Image: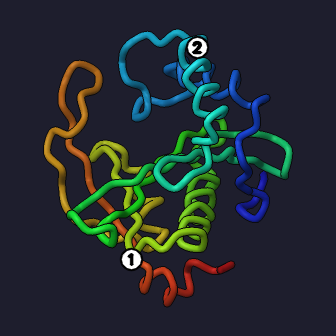
Amino acid sequence: MATNGEVGLRAVTEADLPWLAAIAADPEASGEHNWGGQPVDPSDVEEELRARFRDDRLLGFDRGSMIVELDGRTPIGDVSWRAEQWGPSAASRCLAFGITLLPSYRGKGHGTEAQRQLITYLFRTTDVHRIQSDTAADNPAERRALEKLGMHPEGVVRQAEYRAGRYHDHILFSVLRPEWHDARSWGRH
C-alpha cells in the first residue's frame, strides 16, 4: 500500500483534460459529494476545461486546479480552488478548495495529504490570510480529513447544496495563516 509520502501535486497539462472531463461526467468516479446529479456530456466539460487551459486559468489566484498523483506518475484525482470575498477590502479575500479522488484511492490518506500540500502551496504562493473548505454534513470522511489537517469547523451552512433530490447542509472549515505557520502538523513548509 502506498504511503502519504508518495502523494504529490502537479500542474494540469493539456493531456489531462480528457481524463478530468471523463471524471466530471462519471457519477461513480466523481463521487456522490461531487456529482451534481444531472447528466454531463464529457465533451462539454472538456471544451470548458480547454478554454480555461488556453486562458491560463487552471493555475491562477482566483481559480485553479492541480492533478493529484501517486508515485509521481499515476493521476488519482484533482484539487481545485477559487477565490471568495468576505468583505469589500482586498484583504477580505480568501481561497476555498475542494478535492476529487478516484474511488479506489479514497480512504487511504491520499486526500488528506493532497489537501495538506495544496494548503501549503496556496499559503506559500499567495498573501491570503484565510483558506477555507466546506463539506457536506453527511460526508464524514472529508470532515475527518479537514480536522486531521488542523482546520477549524466554523459552523453549519444550512441547506447549501442541492443533491440527490434534496438540500443538504454543509460544514465550513478554515485555517488562518498564523495557525498554518505555527502548527507542527503542517510539516514540510
- Circle 2 sits in a helix, a strand or a loop, which is it? helix
Answer whether labels 1 and 2 touch (C-beta < 8 Å).
no
Which residue corresponds to the image point at 21% horizontal and 63% vertical from the top-left? Answer: 88
Which residue corresponds to the image point at 36% horizontal and 44% vertical from the top-left? Answer: 139
Q: Residue 177: where, in percent of width, then height?
A: 44, 79
Question: Image quarter for residue 38?
Answer: top left
Quarter of the image with the C terminus in it: bottom right
Which kind of residue does numbered mark 1 sit on?
Leu
Circle 1 residue: 176
Q: Residue 26: where, in percent of width, then height?
A: 55, 18
- Circle 1 sits in a helix, a strand or a loop, which is it? strand
Which residue corresponds to the image point at 18% horizontal and 54% vertical from the top-left? Answer: 156
Neighbourhood count class around disc 1 (C-alpha, 10 Å): few under 14, some 14–19, many 20 upward: some
Circle 2 residue: 42
Name the side, left or right, on which 18 lies relative to 47: right
> Could you give the CA–CA distance between mark 1 and mark 2, rounded to whole angstroms?
36 Å
Q: Is the residue 42 above or below the residue 124 in the image? A: above
Name the side, left or right, on which 80 lies relative to 166: right
Along the line of sight, the residue nearer the viewer: 131 or 77: 131
Q: Residue 16: where, in percent of width, then height?
A: 74, 31
Taking the view exactly as shown, the residue that stands out farthest to the left is 158
Q: Residue 168: where, in percent of width, then height?
A: 21, 36
Closer to the chain start, of discs 1 and 2, is: 2
Along the line of sight, the residue nearer the viewer: 43 or 61: 61
Name the side, left or right, on which 164 lies relative to 122: left
Which residue corresponds to the image point at 44% horizontal and 74% vertical from the top-left? Answer: 150
